[in-house]
């Protein structure tokens, strides 16, 4: 009899040879397949395709190449090939985007048993509309990049900001996803912003409304909820939550359509670790909210808010020894 | 003489041509190789293969395709190809998993100089056992998805939750890794959960015990330590740490086998930024712990705990100017 | 007339067929191309190549294979192929690194309209210099790995630490990037550390100075600013910020060259969620800073600092009901 590794918790009376285990795989596969039939799991088995997460990520990369031409090319972009490269990239983006939007719409139609007579056409129309926003998106993102550079003494160049700043990546993805969100395209907007969340630690819901020259520095742990409204020239730091107040579970359904997250007016700064909650909470223009603040009510314009420094207790090693 | 870029700190007396530098690479390579011989580095040079991180990530993707059929396919899954696709996926998963478990076991055997007479057979047996858990895993994850949807007013559909919620991804990876952990498979469980940590910012040790309908919202910064015990229907938010109290370094060895992390009973909610520490700390059933709380002792069932709001200091611009 | 999906907000009077939308893409592409011409966007269109983010990520993986031989190979590394594998890897790394450094230098030269007479040679020289640091880097990283293992009761083996600990990955990338940073290579160092930030949630600026046996546990949310100085045997936990004090926007330019971030002396421990700010703030040797502390002034050596526990308010369900 073959004995197993002494530390392992596998239920073994007698080990079979390797082929003996492999022969049992079809039995296990049948169990897995049949278990699904009896409805204890979420499946997506039907005759229509579902959006592809991989394609959505590719779409974001295509947008980035077009929005910041030359920065994310594998080969150099020069005045000779510029028009061809961007023209080709735009066409490819249209093709991917129209397919994914069509899939998302059809998936949604089937889900709610509504008849969508023209998922494919509508998907193409929506994709074209979104592409038409690119010059506007680019202008906004150019201003966002400039604002990040202007406010950060550690930034060495605008190129470094475009290349590597997570805040810029998260804001870019949010601005793209928001264009889909306001057109009620299902599934794709959140898939986009959660991809950015994964890459940057910055979680911006595509439904939020965000003004110009927005800066997120460092960014890990930032949460910006669905119905947040943010003005122009706002800066927030790592670990800031703009969230909802907690409410009883039976209120979830009616909350889906209400403003649950705060309003941050123009020129506000919110330092790291601060939490601002509630749909009726407004931070007035030009206010500064210090770090680690927990706010659930409004602040007047032109106000500085910080916490009374918690009393710190100091002990020296000597004292501890005595 | 060629002069270098004026800003660069490279030690240059006179620049060689490009080939001149390349010719020196073998000298540097020898230095690197020989440095390793004298034992100042960790190497893994032996006749047996080590688990592959890339393969572990692929294994997680294979699990996901089987647990949520149709959601993460590149091509559509329909009633015609469903059985074949899942059957094929299950076989492929068995093959990858049995190889990686075998490598991990053999690697461990060699490390501790124990004789494992049957690493390969044991690996296959363990892989089969883990596959047999898939229907149970799927049932648990279905309940987790439903709980996330039920509690989040921003969720548009169950599909959106499966597609994009980081909490669901982290819980799925944890539940898979836990099945390996409780069978004492080395290396793989932590590699799996650290991959999820990387993707989501949610750090769940594979040794934690977690009940049904578990919800992690947003999730960035969540830490759940090795000996944490979590009941059913628990919800936690971004930045929550369920951790260990700090202890003197000479205690590390004996601590490796003790309960060092808290117990969270059924139906508890822990809001963002809260830290709960210690192996004897128990949060009683149905309690709610507010945001930014720091807790190192137990809380009775049916209790709400929050911090006395730190005094906020407000200054208007006018006051500051005066 | 075809009607669109009833929920969608796309501006539709009458839907065209699919080809009708695709025919409009060239018009949109022209708009996108011409918009760029009028200068409202950042572009990188010139005759010289820019560093490639994908290549920078590959370079980090090549470094890792050389620094920890055998751990991140797809095939096994044994005494027979060891010398060839490392020799080949070192040559390949030199080739990639010299190209990327050359691109970064030339990009920078063009940016500031300085004449760099020898970007390519300097790039090769710098790459060789950095490669010569590998034995030293490996020695430091070996000590970092050992320190992580020694301090973590949840670590099962040194291999697990190398394989999966995000702190080790972030520290490795920082130590590599720092070698480029101190040689004033533009763009690449920050691209490297922001990649590690993306993977781990740990944001270490390549300019920071960090001693031996450095431990970052869990790590999500850690921020270490550009001019931070950290001694030997320091340990920090998730959510720790070593940052700059906020200053008026018109001070940004002069701040670019000043010490803005704290000094952490030997043997200091900083627990989770703590923020330490300011270029004149020094935490003296052997001090311990508790969790959630907010510090903007120096601490003497051998001191323990923690916050006076905020008063917690407990309510039982009964009390709430009454």
Image (cartoon, coloured by chain):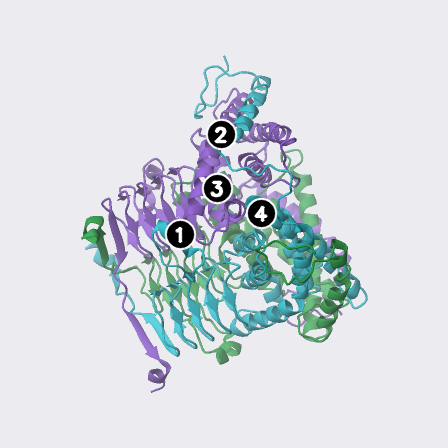
Chain colours: A green, B cyan, C purple
One can see residue B225 in this view: yes
**Residue bearing the label numbered 2:** C135
User: Where in the figure is residue C250, as x and y percent of width and height?
Assistant: 33, 43
Residue B245 or residue A295, whichever sits in front: B245
Q: Are marks 2 and 3 in contact (CB under 8 Å)?
A: no
**Residue bearing the label numbered 1:** B252
Q: Mark 3 against mark 1, which lies toward the viewer?
A: 1
User: Where in the figure is residue A212, as x and y percent of width and height?
Assistant: 46, 54
Judge if badges 2 and 1 mark residues of a common chain. no
Q: Are marks 4 and 2 in contact (CB under 8 Å)?
A: no
Q: Mark 2 against mark 1, which lies toward the viewer?
A: 1
Q: Is B98 left, or right, of B36 in this rendering?
A: right
Q: Is B216 left, or right, of A81 in this rendering?
A: left
- From what the image shows, is residue A54 above or below residue C46? below
**Residue bearing the label numbered 4:** B114
Give the structural element (helix, strand or loop) at label 2.
Answer: helix
């Amino acid at each position: 009899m073959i004995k197993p590794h002494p530390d392992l918790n596998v239920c073994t009376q007698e080990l079979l040879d390797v082929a003996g285990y492999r022969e049992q795989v079809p039995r296990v596969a049948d169990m897995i397949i049949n278990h699904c039939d009896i409805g204890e799991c979420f499946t997506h088995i039907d005759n229509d395709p579902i959006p592809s997460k991989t394609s959505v990520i590719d779409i974001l990369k295509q947008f980035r190449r077009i929005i910041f031409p030359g920065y994310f090319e594998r080969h150099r972009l020069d005045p000779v090939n510029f028009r061809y490269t961007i023209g080709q990239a735009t066409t490819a983006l249209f093709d991917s985007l129209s397919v994914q939007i069509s899939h998302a719409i059809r998936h949604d139609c089937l889900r709610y048993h509504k008849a969508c007579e023209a998922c494919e056409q509508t998907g193409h129309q929506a994709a074209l509309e979104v592409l038409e926003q690119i010059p506007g998106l680019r202008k906004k993102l150019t201003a966002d990049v400039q604002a990040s550079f202007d406010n950060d003494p550690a930034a060495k160049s605008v190129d470094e900001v475009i290349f590597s700043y997570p805040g810029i990546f998260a804001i870019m993805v949010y601005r793209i996803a928001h264009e889909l969100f306001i057109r009620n395209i299902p599934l794709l907007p959140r898939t986009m912003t959660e991809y950015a969340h994964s890459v940057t630690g910055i979680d911006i819901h595509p439904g939020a409304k965000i003004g110009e020259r927005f800066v997120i520095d460092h960014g890990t742990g930032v949460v910006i909820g669905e119905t947040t409204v943010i003005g122009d020239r706002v800066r927030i730091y790592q670990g800031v939550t703009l969230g909802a107040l907690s409410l009883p579970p039976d209120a979830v359904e009616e909350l889906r359509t209400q403003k649950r997250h705060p309003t941050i007016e123009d020129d506000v700064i919110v330092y790291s670790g601060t939490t601002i909650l509630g749909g009726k909470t407004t931070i007035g223009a030009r206010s500064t909210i210090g770090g680690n603040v927990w706010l659930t009510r409004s602040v007047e314009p032109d106000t500085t808010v910080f916490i009374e420094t918690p009393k710190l207790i100091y002990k020296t090693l000597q004292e501890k020894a005595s």
